[in-house]
Amino acid sequence: MMSQSNPIQLCRELSLQVEQEDSIKPEDLRIKYLGKNGLFKKLSALIKEVPADQKKLFGQKLNQLKNKIEEKINDLENQRQTDQAKIDLTLPGKKRPVGHLHPISQAIEEISQIFEKIGFNRVRYPEVDFDYYVFEALNMPKDHPARDEWETFFVDTQPSEKLGKMVLTTHTSNGQIHEMERLNAQPPIRMINVSRTYRRQSDATHTQMFHQFEGLVIDKGINIQHLKGTLDYFAESFYGPGTKSRIRPFHFRFTEPSFEVDFSCHICGGTGKNCHFCKSGWHEVGGAGMVHPNVLRMGGIDPDIYTGFAFGWGVERTYTLKKGLNIDDIRLFYSSNVEFLEQF
């Protein structure tokens, strides 16, 4: 610009430019125009190009331009002081957005605290484990459907000669054998194991990755009454006073006898009357039973001296049955829907 126009014309153009400088900070304006390498100094250096009969006029224009720049700087400083005076320092500041634990993490913490209050020790065992711990040591025969590749995720790696193939754990029950080994087969054992598990299922009530919590108690004289009392305690602690549990005969390979566990419905109070949610007064939460003697033996524990009970349920399913949530698709927990997650 400085080398392509008449210096006097440049004074006019620069003066117009200064008038339009409304969003710049005063200190930045001073540097831009009056600084060591500012536009005003560059323009002043052009006086040698001005004809002799126009030098006086050019000098007058430079003085006018400098005055305008200084006035603009003063105006901007005054405006900034006025704007600052409008700020009410007594007003509360704007709170920064604060995150929170994922709802499933919240459920895991609540479940853990409930069992820790009655002496359960929180542990965590591998999510990728050997066939031996997931199936073999839990009394599952080679032809059991759960060991089929259409039910279980197998890891493409070299199998262990002793422990077999590696799998993504289908349940947290693998922790039972690990805990017996950790304690050198020396009861008492009172364990709560919470971990991710994996199965080839995906629909409104199943995801290929989900969470389970596994309870295991082994000691002398443990019986079904201890199991039932623990279930009732958890039902009331997690779902509220008055919630009851019931057990129904079932079949699991690693417990004998085995049971399906139901909790009384919190919506109809266990009556089942006109309840669209449970239709019977109960809703199923998971499985439980007395630890199978073969499982105790695999863990190095004598079943003639010790007995125990175990239970294992999905965290997501257990959580969605809470009063007031009304969640009909557990896949929402693992979606990117922030509006849904922010409700918890």
Image: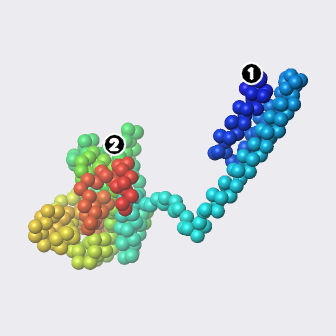
Image quarter in which the C terminus is found: bottom left
**Residue of label 2:** 154
Residue at point 15% right, 64% down? 278
Where is residue 342? Give x, y as percent: 39, 58
Q: Which of marks 1 and 2 is in front?
A: 1
Compared with 127, 110 (above or below) is below
Which of the two residues, 334 or 187, is positioned nearer the viewer here?
334
Amino acid at the residue labelled 1: Gln
Q: Vertical placement of 52 versus 72: above or below?
A: above
- Residue 55 image-quadrant placement: top right
Side of 101 relative to 54 (left or right) = left
Badge 2 amino acid? Phe
Q: Nearer the viewer, residue 303 or 137?
A: 137
Residue 313: image tag: none
Most foreground residue, 49 or 318:
49
- Residue at position x 74%, y 23% in the image: 5
Residue assigned mark 1: 4
Residue 138 image position (x, y, % from top left):
29, 56
Quadrant of res 105: bottom left
How many other residues sit within 10 Å of disc 2, few (<14), some (14-19) or many (≥20)?
some
Q: Mark 2 falls on what kind of element?
A: loop
Picture coordinates of residue 338 (x, y %)? 39, 52
Circle 1 — which element? Answer: loop
Name the residue: 14% across, 62% down. 276
Residue 230 % position (x, y): 28, 74
